[in-house]
Image (cartoon, grey):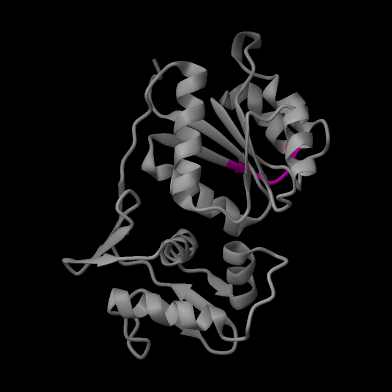
């Protein structure tokens, strides 16, 4: 049995992605730490003793997964989930050869990450981990199971893409996200989009949230740059 929340070490150098992963893990009972390199993560292993590692395979060296995964307590191997922006079979097979237990291609949906983490933790530790379908962010309640959001007492149905966009914005609350960052994290770095794709999806999400761009409650426009999620006072 875990004594307190399970500890998850994120080895990810892109803060936008790291914060999305960290917020998504709030659907369970986890403490997370973010390290931007495999060397700094390795230095933390002995003192913090994580139960799970989520590692950016595009950042890590070839031996990073083997070194980090082999550092569990009592010589037990730590479970590792790899993240990669290259979704080809060769990349995935190479990741499994390096020692990952599972791999996700970026971009991914929050519900997919939640499911993979729950399954891997149950398989590794023979325990059913806590799962909380609803995240509360101030006035917003995000239900990942039913893909809905409650805002101002009204239940709103979101598409998968709208839910992913809301997670991306909310996880980076207060921080400017450029259109290019939003494109990269929702559609992938190789996606070629028409010029107004991000603006169109922001507009649709705002309409469902009943968010007037002239008096924004949730999503503010930064002219010529991008968008910023506005955290509510009790978020």
Q: Residue at x 60, y 14 (%)?
A: 73
Q: Residue at x 43, y 35 (%)?
A: 30
Q: Position of residue 135 (x, y in %)?
A: 32, 51
| Quadrant position of the N terminus in the picture | top left
Image quarter of residue 219: bottom left
**Considering depth in this image, is 186 or 177 the residue closer to the camera?**
186
Farthest left residue in view: 153
Residue 35 forms part of the magenta stretch? yes
Farthest top residue in view: 74
Compared to residue 16, the image places residue 111 above or below, namely above
Compared to residue 185, the image places residue 115 above or below, namely above
- Whether residue 149 is visible, yes or no, is yes
Q: Position of residue 150 (x, y in %)?
A: 24, 63
Image quarter of residue 62: top right
Q: Residue at x 76, y 47 (%)?
A: 59
**Considering depth in this image, is 40 or 182 the residue closer to the camera?**
182
Which span of residues is magenta-colored?
A: 34-38
Q: Position of residue 51 (x, y in %)?
A: 54, 25
| Quadrant position of the C terminus in the picture | bottom left
């Amino acid at each position: 049995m875990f004594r307190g929340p399970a500890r998850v070490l994120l080895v990810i150098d892109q803060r936008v992605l790291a914060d999305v992963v960290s917020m998504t893990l709030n659907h369970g009972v986890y403490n997370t730490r973010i390290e931007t390199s495999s060397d700094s993560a390795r230095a933390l292993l002995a003192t913090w003793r994580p139960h799970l590692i989520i590692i950016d395979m595009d950042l890590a060296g070839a031996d990073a997964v083997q070194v980090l995964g082999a550092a569990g307590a009592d010589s037990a191997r730590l479970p590792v989930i790899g993240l990669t922006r290259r979704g080809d079979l060769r990349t995935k097979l190479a990741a499994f050869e390096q020692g990952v237990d599972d791999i996700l291609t970026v971009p991914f949906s929050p519900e997919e990450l939640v499911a993979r983490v729950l399954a891997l933790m149950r398989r590794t530790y023979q325990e059913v981990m806590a799962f909380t379908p609803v995240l509360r962010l101030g006035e917003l309640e995000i239900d990942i199971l039913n893909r809905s959001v409650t805002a101002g007492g009204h239940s709103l149905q979101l598409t998968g893409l709208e839910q992913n966009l809301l997670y991306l914005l909310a996880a980076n609350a207060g921080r400017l996200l450029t259109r290019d960052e939003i494109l990269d994290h929702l559609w992938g770095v190789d996606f070629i989009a028409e010029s107004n794709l991000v603006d169109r999806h922001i507009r649709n999400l705002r309409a469902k949230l009943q968010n007037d761009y002239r008096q924004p409650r949730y999503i503010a426009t930064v002219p010529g740059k991008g968008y910023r999620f506005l955290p509510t006072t009790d978020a």
